Amino acid sequence: MLGGIAIIVVVLLIPVAVLMTGAAASAVLGEVFYRDGKKDAHPELADLPD
C-alpha cells in the first residue's frame, strides 16, 4: 500500500517539477537575452518604448 502511494506521488511530482524548472530557466534566459539586447542596441533604438 505504501509503495503504491509513493509511486502515485512520484508520478505526479516529477512532471510538475520538470515543468516548473523549465519555466524558471526560460524566465532567466529571457531576462539575460533582454538585457543583452538592450545593452547592444543602437542609440536611436534605445529611446523607443518597450
Image (cartoon, rainbow, N blue to C red):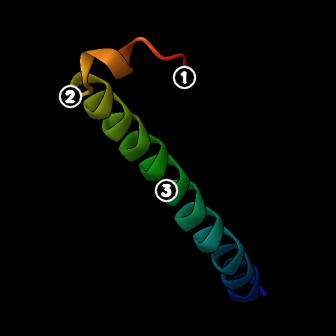
Q: Nearer the viewer, residue 12 or 27?
A: 27
Dot placed on the residue nearer the N-terminal end, 1 or 3: 3
Instruction: Give, as a three-letter code, the residue at label 1.
Output: Asp
Q: Which residue is mark 3?
A: 21
The reply to whether the C-beta atoms of the residues labelled 3 and 2 are less than 8 Å apart is: no
In the image, residue 37 lies at what x, y percent? 30, 33
Chain-order first, disc 3 or disc 2: 3
Which image quadrant for residue 46? top left
Mark 1 or 2, nearer chain start? 2
Q: Position of residue 29 (x, y in %)?
A: 37, 46
Q: Residue at x 65, y 64 (%)?
A: 16
3D distance between C-alphas at marks 1 and 3: 27 Å
x 46%, y 51%: residue: 26
* Amino acid carrying mark 3 in the image: Thr
Q: Residue furthest front?
A: 44
Distance from Cα at disc 3 to Cα at disc 2: 29 Å
What residue sits right under mark 1 in the picture?
50
Q: Is residue 23 above or below residue 2?
A: above
- Picture quarter containing residue 36? top left
